[in-house]
Every structure is written in structure tokens, then in C-alpha cells.
Image: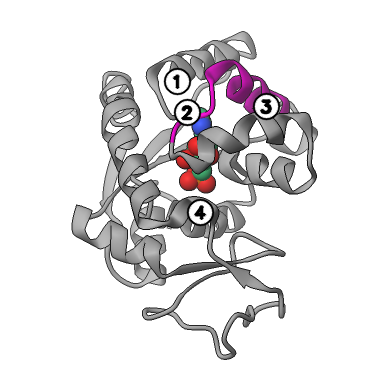
Amino acid sequence: MRIVLVGPPGAGKGTQAALLAKNLSIPHISTGDLFRANISQGTELGRKAKSYMDAGNLVPDEVTIEMAKDRMEQQDAAGGFLLDGFPRNVPQAEALDDMLKAESMKLDAVLDLEIPEEEVVERIAGRRICRNDSAHVFHVVNKPPKRDGVCDVCGGELYQRDDDSEGTVRKRLEVYHQKTEPIIDYYRRQDLVVTISASGPVEEVTARAMQALGVS
Ligand code: AMP
């Protein structure tokens, strides 16, 4: 399957993407994770992306589209993929359509995660992520790790993303409404959108998503 996951920051895209990709045996491709890996490896791409990310803005399309395309062209993505955080605006959605068309491929679904705005800031402000694996996500109140600052799954160090501060989250939300939400209409016109509520326990949201995708 070829799936795009959309939703505001804090909707749990990364968590759900990792679980769904595992259930469906397809790679989870997160442009945010790819940028963060480039930043921690000190690459030129990471250097270019960092200032945009820290300000809560989108990284320019020419950089992002090229990076996403390279990743989608890798062997493990030949049979399908789950995109998390890409596309994030209409030009990226058009570029993705062109890429797929060139390979005679199509998207199967666009899963839209809905969450009330007031939950977003609270979810993100308390979020702590494992340095070893961004799918290991905790929350200081809702899902505290057994030991402060230590991942329950692998013992890795938990940290707060640089762009998870309250001011940056508000900017990211504004960017989401302005730039990313229009892709939902774009995909509605292709009859690809399935919307589910992202509120509630992680397992319930995953079950809802699997059902909405017709794979449960
Ligand atoms: P995420 O991990 O998906 O929340 O992404 C974190 C940040 O990476 C975003 O706030 C953007 O600055 C940047 N980013 C991730 N994906 C994209 C994309 N498709 N286009 C532009 N910027 C992106």
C-alpha cells in the first residue's frame, strides 16, 4: 500500500506511522526524521534545514522533494510506503503525484488524523522522544517513562525536540493551517481521504486507522 498520513503537529503522526507501517510491513518514511538524522550527522542538508525547523517553518520544497524522492526510490519502498510529514503543501503533493505517475503508481489512501487544537499544545509540550528511535515516544504526564529521562523500550536517552517549545508549536500549527491543510482538499478531489479521530489511547487510534484503511 502507498499511504500518506496528515494531521497537525501533536496528532501522533510519528507514533501511528511507526505502528501502521509495522502492521502493514511497509517502510515508514518521515521527512522530519530524515532532516533530524541529517542534523545530527552534521550534513550540508541538515545545516540547510535546521534554521527553518527551529523557527517552525517548512524547509524549502527543492530540498525536501529531492530528499523524499531519494528515499522513496530505495529498494525497500518499491512495494509500498507510509509517508509521514510529506507532502506538506500543494506543490509537494503535485510533485509526489508526478513521481508516482512516472512509475505508473498511485496512492491508496490519505489518512487524516483529527485532533482538537487545545490538545495539541499540551501533547507536544510534554512529549519526550528517544534518541535511538523516534517511534519510542513518551509524555511527562500521559505516558511517563519508568525512569526519568530513560526510554522504557531500549534504555536510550529521552529528549525534547528543539521545535517542541510552545512558541514554535504555535508557529507550526499556523503553518499547518495555511500550507498543509489545503492538501486535504487536493486529495479529497482524488477521493483518497479517510479522516479519523486521533484522540484517545494509542492502540485505539491504531485500530481505528486500520479499520478506516480497510486492513483490520
Ligand atoms: P515533523 O517531524 O514531521 O513534525 O517535522 C519537523 C519539521 O521538519 C517541520 O516543522 C519542518 O520544519 C520540517 N519538515 C518536515 N517535513 C517537511 C516537509 N515535507 N516540507 C517542509 N518541511 C518539512
Mark 1 in CB contact with mark 2 (< 8 angstroms): yes
Query: In the shown orientation, is residue 109 left or right of residue 79?
Result: left
**Amino acid marked by disc 3:** Met
Classify 98 as above or below 133.
Answer: above
Q: Quadrant of the C terminus?
A: bottom left
- Nearer to the camera, 82 or 44: 44
SS label for mark 1:
helix
Residue 124, x across and y down, in percent: 39, 61
- Gap in Å between the C-alphas at discs 3 and 4? 18 Å
Task: Check disc 4 and report the residue beneath it.
Answer: 14
- Gap in Å between the C-alphas at discs 1 and 2? 5 Å
- Gap in Å between the C-alphas at discs 4 and 2? 14 Å
- Disc number at residue 67? 3
Q: Residue at x 67, y 35 (%)?
A: 79
Task: Check disc 1 and report the residue beneath it.
Answer: 93
- Disc number at residue 139? none
